[in-house]
Image (cartoon, grey):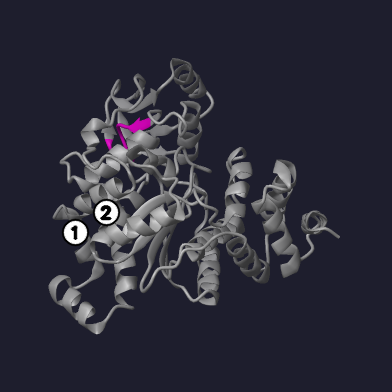
Amino acid sequence: MTERDLAIAAIRKKLVGKPLRYKEIYSIMDQISQNKLGDVLTTYFAASGFSKGFSDEEIYWLIKAMVETGQKLKFKGIVADKHSIGGVPGTRTTLIIVPIVAAAGFKIPKSSSRAITTPSGTADDMEILAPVNLSRRKIYSVVERTNGCIVWGGSFNIAPADDVIIKVEEVLLFESFDKILISVMAKKIAFGSNHVVIDIPYGKSVKVHRLSDAKIIKNKFEKMAKKFDIKIEVLIHKTDEPAGRGIGPILEVKEALMVLEQDPNRSLDLEARSINLSGSLLELCLSSSSKGRQELIRKKYKNGYNLAKDILVSGAALSKMKEIIKAQGGNPNVSSKSLKPGKYSFKITAHKKGAVTSINSKNLTLIARILGAPDMKGSGIFLNKKIGEKVSRGDPICTFYSDSMYNLREGKDSLKNFSLISIK
């Protein structure tokens, strides 16, 4: 039996709910990574995981096989990373966290994905500031010079099977919880990360709906991290709306830069979320640092959260981000004011007086994609009002942007079927 035949037989076996052995799993990952199965068979495999799930043993083998069928990076010492399981548009914390942690003196080579279930992925956003398709040698060079990088995980054969599977999942806008775990852990291991913070948002209109599901995912992450000798902290939080106001590549990058620049009009919610995650990651890294370093930080800042805040407020994070942008081949002089959203726009206004009571993140994603995100970098939605904010009749509650008049019209027409913001 050829490797391809073994992979197809294994997919057939999984579709009817039977467990797989490591050899079968490896054959699937090997064939997918070499693009030998095609979209149809790859989709069948993705669907088998969504409907039937995987055992802990299968998850471990899938992570191991996904890493082993691609290239790997190795860095000395503490290597930090953060990952959100996603599903929340307009929450681009990575562009703030990476420079904070790098400025604190820890290595943070960030492997990021393109959009799967949101209007823009971190790689789609960072691409506005600098190239993200970096070679292995270039990544080493950037991290050596700056301590950090933000690159697309599929740029040089890191866990290549994952990027193929992501492409077939993107069309349907779904990922199974097990697949999220496998994808995240494989990329972290392949990038040499050994200190990782995982962010799990849950809520009725995001990827994870219930606290009970978030706890199950947290438990699985902790199990796998232990097996691969990774220090991990998994943070769970309820999410009713995006942390920021901008949704779509340029709008998200603009907002992240405003936080780094400490602009008076920055999103304080996005800033608070970024500091919280940065602080957790710095605490995790400090727990493995020398006693001298720990004592120095504790004496001056007391904890990682205060350190993260100081790095942001002092401007050190902004300086570090400019270093990273330059090292990756971008323009370090970029500013939030220089980034302009799509030239076609339309304001959605309140039909009555009241206050915003809910925002549907899932529908925000659907309409932002109709507007052209992430391929049209200027397309997206700006939330003029968020939950709890008062509105008068006729006030703008959100603004649509697009690089195409056709897409803007389609987005406006879609409002009949997809409600975005509730006012009471």
Q: Look at the image and give the residue range highlighted in magenta.
A: 381-389
- In three-dimensional space, the C-alpha distance between marks 2 and 1, rounded to whole angstroms, equals 13 Å
Lower position in the chain sequence, tag 2 or tag 1: 2
Q: What's the residue at 56%, 57% (across, down)?
A: 159
| Label 2 residue SS | helix
* Camera-nearest residue between 42 and 367: 42
The kind of residue tagged 2 is: Ala
Q: Which mark is residue 272?
A: 2
Q: How would you classify the magenta stretch by its main secondary structure? A: loop
Q: What's the residue at 45%, 56% (across, down)?
A: 136
- Horizontal side of 280 relative to 15 (left or right) equals left
Q: Quarter-wise, where is residue 277 in the image?
A: bottom left
Residue that mark 1 sits on: 311
Against 182, residue 164 (above or below) is above
Q: What's the residue at 24%, 51% (across, down)?
A: 323
Is 388 within the magenta? yes
Where residue 417 appears, as percent x and y from the top left, is: 54, 26
